């Protein structure tokens, strides 16, 4: 399964009790309430859907836009 930007946004929003429209690509996710435990839950869920990306990529970046760049590169490399 392909993980999309909008799926990522919706999954993040669900975990931090926001509407997906409230999360911009450049918003600092920890400032919106995404802590390390929730981040681990997200990465685990995305891995279960076939996304294989090092947790460190998510931990080192703090915006959805940065995550999406890494994920889209990975998916394009296939």
Image (cartoon, rainbow, N blue to C red):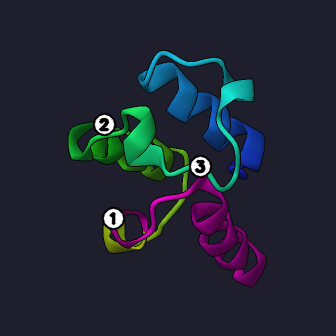
* Disc on the earlier residue, 1 or 3: 3
Q: Residues within 10 Å of mark 1 (few under 14, many from 20)?
A: few
Q: Quadrant of residue 60?
A: bottom left
Closer to the camera in the image, 43 or 60: 60
The residue depicted at 43 percent of the width and 24 percent of the height is 16
Count of marks overlaid on the render: 3
Disc 2 target residue: 38
Q: Is the residue 15 above or below the residue 61 in the image?
A: above
Q: Main secondary structure of the magenta part?
A: helix
* Disc on the earlier residue, 2 or 1: 2
Of circles 3 and 2, the one toward us is 3
Question: Secondary structure beneath disc 2?
Answer: helix
- Which stretch appears magenta? 58-78
The residue depicted at 52 percent of the width and 20 percent of the height is 14
Q: Is the residue 4 above or below the residue 63 in the image?
A: above
Image position, residue 5 (x, y; %): 74, 49
Image position, residue 52 (x, y; %): 48, 66
| Furthest residue in direction bottom, as rendered | 77
Q: Residues within 10 Å of mark 3 (few under 14, many from 20)?
A: some
Closer to the camera in the image, 34 or 39: 34
Q: Quadrant of residue 20?
A: top right
Disc 3 target residue: 27
The residue depicted at 31 percent of the width and 36 percent of the height is 38
Give the number of the disc on residue 59.
1
In whole angstroms, how far apart are the C-alphas of marks 3 and 2? 16 Å
* Disc on the earlier residue, 3 or 2: 3
Identify the image quadrant of the C terminus: bottom right
Give the number of the disc on residue 21.
none
Q: Are marks 3 and 2 in contact (CB under 8 Å)?
A: no
């Amino acid at each position: 399964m392909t993980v999309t930007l909008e799926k990522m946004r919706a999954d993040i929003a669900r975990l931090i009790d926001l509407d997906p429209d409230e999360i911009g690509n450049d918003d600092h996710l920890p400032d919106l309430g995404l802590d390390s435990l929730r981040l681990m839950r997200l990465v685990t869920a995305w891995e279960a859907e076939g996304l294989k990306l090092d947790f460190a990529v998510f931990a080192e970046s703090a915006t959805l836009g940065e995550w999406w760049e890494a994920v889209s590169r990975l998916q394009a490399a296939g």
